[in-house]
Image (cartoon, grey):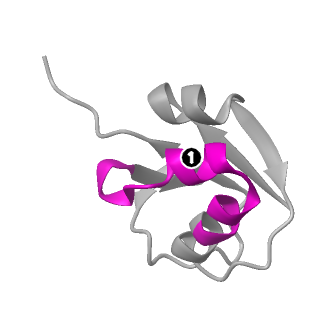
Amino acid sequence: MIEVLYFAWVRERIGVPREKVETGAATVADLVEELKAREERYAAAFADVSALRVALDQELAEFSAPLSGVSEVAFFPPMTGG
């Protein structure tokens, strides 16, 4: 079981800030594919992963990163400086 967190417009499209997900995904990209297959709102949120960043247990990671041993995955748009 992995805790998945959604921030900014990702949260707005999916409609929840976080959820626990039972997954067999080996990588972040695999998890995204599982989520996209769930419902249209997930497909919309993950339609363009190049517009997203991911953190595993609060450390920035790539979509190719393995999920083994990870307890939290967070998806968010790139942060812009000000």
State which quadrant residue 21 falls in.
Answer: bottom right
Determine the residue located farthest toward the top in the rendered image.
82
Name which residue lies at 70% across and 78% down.
25
Q: Is residue 36 visible in this depiction of the protein?
A: yes
How many residues crowd mark 1 within 10 Å: few (<14), some (14–19), many (20+)? many
Residue 43 in the image, given as x and y percentages of width and height: 57, 54
> Residue 58's x, y, as percent?
53, 47
Residue for point 55% across, 69% down: 28
Circle 1 sits on which residue?
A: 74
Query: What's drawn in magenta, residue-wise?
Result: 33-52
Q: Is residue 51 above or below residue 8?
A: below
Residue furthest to the front: 40
SS at badge 1: strand
Identify whether 42 is placed above or below 78.
Answer: below
Which secondary structure class fits the magenta region best? helix
Query: In x, y percent, where is residue 24?
Result: 79, 79
Comparing 79 with 33, the one in front is 33
